[in-house]
Image: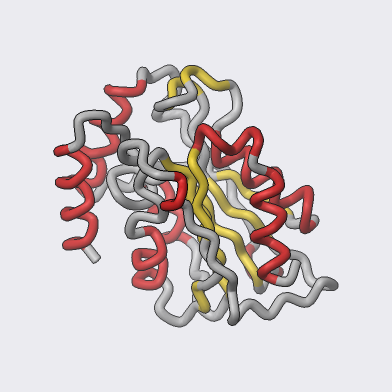
């Protein structure tokens, strides 16, 4: 889906008030999609895999806890899901604009930054996959995780935080990466709304049967 990412990146560059995740738009652009193909057994354990950026963020300033981390915590609180946070120190202490420039360069170079830790994904059939939208898709460090772990055959539920670009190409890119996975039930929320958005996350999860 390289053409989709390129189109989204160009569109974002043309906006006056822009961010790595896009400009602010109408709240109706937020996406809650019921997952008709989610088959979750409450006795089974789900996993939340996510990348979240603390520090200088568009619309919310310098934050100690990243927007996506807050949503991931909501999911775990409500469903009891385990977590694996994709962590890298590459972006630590960076101001917002230089970080956007770096994220764009990483995407253009198809760079796969290293991340910390590991997780046994074999024990999970349902995996939530979350991150901010950077230049129309997942941050490149998430593609590093995707390259390392085979999630084909699993149910993958994408969720994103953003400031205008919704899900971007994240769903399509996840499907391209894992063509034999069941990618369904996607959700997106504005980063500046996550701190008061637990009820929206809970409503979404109820639609999925959790």
Q: Nearer the viewer, residue 98 or 167?
A: 167
User: Which residue does the image show at 40% across and 78% down from the upper left?
Assistant: 179
- Across and down, in percent, residue 112 comes to 33, 47
Q: Is residue 123 left or right of residue 68?
A: right
Rendered view: 93 above or below 53: above
User: Which residue does the image show at 38% across and 69% down from the upper left?
Assistant: 177
Quick one: quadrant of the C terminus?
A: bottom right
Q: Nearer the viewer, residue 52 or 26?
A: 26
- Across and down, in percent, residue 147 comes to 40, 61
Q: Quadrant of residue 134?
A: top left
- Across and down, in percent, residue 28 comes to 45, 51
Q: Nearer the viewer, residue 116 or 53?
A: 53
Q: Nearer the viewer, residue 90 or 23?
A: 23
- Across and down, in percent, residue 166 comes to 40, 51
Q: How many marks?
A: 0
User: Which residue does the image show at 43% across and 42% down from the upper left?
Assistant: 162
Q: Quadrant of residue 117?
A: top right
Q: Quadrant of residue 202?
A: bottom right
Q: Is residue 106 left or right of residue 128?
A: left
């Amino acid at each position: 889906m390289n053409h989709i990412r390129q189109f989204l990146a160009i569109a974002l560059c043309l906006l006056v008030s822009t961010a790595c995740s896009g400009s602010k738009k109408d709240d109706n652009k937020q996406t809650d999609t019921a997952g008709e193909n989610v088959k979750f057994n409450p006795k089974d354990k789900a996993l939340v895999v996510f990348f979240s950026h603390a520090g200088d963020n568009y619309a919310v300033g310098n934050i100690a806890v990243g927007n996506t981390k807050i949503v991931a915590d909501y999911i775990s609180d409500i469903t009891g899901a385990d977590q694996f946070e994709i962590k890298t120190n590459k972006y630590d202490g960076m101001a917002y604009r230089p970080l956007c420039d770096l994220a764009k360069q990483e995407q253009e170079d198809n760079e796969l930054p290293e991340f910390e830790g590991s997780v046994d994904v074999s024990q999970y059939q349902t995996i939530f996959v979350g991150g901010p939208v950077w230049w129309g898709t997942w941050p490149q460090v998430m593609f590093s995780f995707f390259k390392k772990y085979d999630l084909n055959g699993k149910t993958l539920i994408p969720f994103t935080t953003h400031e205008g670009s919704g899900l971007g190409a994240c769903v399509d890119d996840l499907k391209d990466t894992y063509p034999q996975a069941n990618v369904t039930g996607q959700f997106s929320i504005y980063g500046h709304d996550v701190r008061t958005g637990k009820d929206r996350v809970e409503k979404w999860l109820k639609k999925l049967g959790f």
